[in-house]
Image: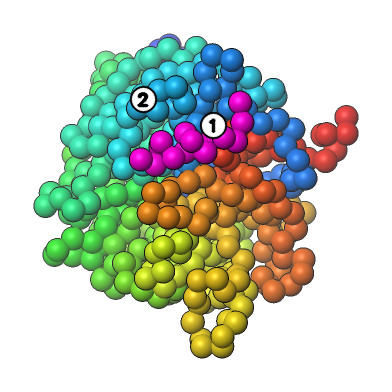
Amino acid sequence: MIRLLILVTLSLASAATAQQRPAAIVSTNLWSQLGNTPAHASTARTEPVDLSSPIWIADGDTSTRLAFLPQSGIVADQTSLYALGYDLSNPSSDLLACFDQNTGALRWTAPVPFGILDSWSTPAIDLASSTIFVASGAFITAFDTTTGNLRWQSPLDKPVVNASPVVTPDLRAADRLFITDYSFGSPNPGALYCINIDPYHPVLNPYQPGERVWSVGLGGATSGNTTAYAHGKVFVSTANSASTNGLVHRFDARATAAPSPDWTTANPLPFGFYSGVSFSGGAVYASSYNFTSGHLNSNTLKLNANTGVILWSTPSNRTDVAPIILSDDRVLVSGGPPAGVFTFFGSRPSIALYTASGELLWDTALATHDDTNSNGTSEPGEPYLSVGGWTHLPILVEHDNQHFLYTGSLADPDMHGFYAPCTDLRLLNLDLPPTDPGFVVDRFQGAGTTPAITNRCLFTLGGSGIHSFAPQQTRSR
């Protein structure tokens, strides 16, 4: 039903060997997986782009017109962009699509297993082998980034919903892909999978590309639990189950058999994690999703990455995305569902900023809400700045000692369109409070879904396709 509504809306809107592998390719100028890095930094150190108008908008070519999965993110390598969607003439089949960064020309499409429950999983690229991976259905599927040719497909025990693959860049001849499956509402716990992505070598890497190295049960349900990777360790959270609160685990990414966790830490509050975790500066961060009403009704944790000890827990908006950590260790959380007909949630989309010690500096929804009837609650129709949200991972931009954020606005849903594309993209000045007139630096209406920045340009999805934005000086050449 959701796809049919999107279809109608869009139709109305427009017409090697192990020795040969490099030691590591990690580029902050590209955007090769969700949040840019396997630690989910979601940070770009470049000048802001001009949002006055896109330099191009693309949705396919004369033979293939695409609609994109509304909350899935874009990834990029040196020359191309990749996004998940489907041909408008055949909405029952999913595709991975490749576009030219400079022109928006469609280079190729490749079929992928159909994603269930409107999964917004984002692809991941292994830059060293020019391979792109898609987690959809109950498979990891690998393609050549240049041609779109299928390289391999690896089956999982259960399907993936909302979790994105994470690729290690620094394990030399034995790099891996990590993914969690979907077990929400199931009596069986979710699982973490470790899949080999490097060429076979009898000593250094005795696995074929796509071969499962191991899988391990996580002791709790999983939905959207994207892993984080750093320094040979993989970090993963779980939702809560009948017997336990949400958990955060650390595993050895170099293990060649199903490992026991190095440590496991339970959320001190009875909430689960339905999102990825992030790693920064020797700490792991995780945000929960509480199903009861209230705006700051969930919590965000900071844990010592070596020991799993909780350094702090602070109230936060419910979310399905990982926190973003600023260079000064402030913590940013995008959370909250748009209300629409779901007024019982009692929260709104927001961006919240915390000190390095977990104290709330501001929350955009709370700071800008106009309580028109002065009853102390946020109600439908009362204005506020709607940015961020529970499915949306923004981009932090740090430039000339200033801190900015590119963030979308979630569509206000009804019962049939909860996962529609973002409606707006804003550039926020994080060094100002939300009530300051200079807080919103720039705005574009018509796109804003989980963006990517590569080669100084920003790319994001909207109802009419991929939108490309460039710095002002680039346009004037």
What residue span does the magenta drawing correspond to? 1-15
Instruction: Identify which residue is drawn at 82% across, 34% down.
Output: 474
| Label 2 vs label 1, nearer the camera | 1
| Disc sitting over residue 239 in the figure | none
Instruction: Identify which residue is drawn at 20% across, 37% down.
Output: 158
Which residue position holds label 1?
11
Q: Residue furthest left?
A: 187
Residue 136 highlighted magenta (yes or no): no
In front: 292, or 63? 63
Q: Secondary structure at mark 2?
A: loop
**Amino acid at pointer 2:** Ser
Q: Quadrant of residue 388?
A: bottom right
Label whose residue precedes the other's in the sequence (2 or 1): 1
In front: 384, or 388? 384
Instruction: Identify which residue is drawn at 31% across, 67% down.
Output: 291
Q: Residue furthest right?
A: 476
In front: 419, or 137? 419
Q: Residues within 10 Å of mark 2 (few under 14, many from 20)?
A: some
Query: How is colour applied across the structure in the image?
Result: rainbow
Residue 9 highlighted magenta (yes or no): yes
Q: Residues within 10 Å of mark 1 (few under 14, many from 20)?
A: few
Instruction: Identify which residue is drawn at 75% across, 58% down.
Output: 441
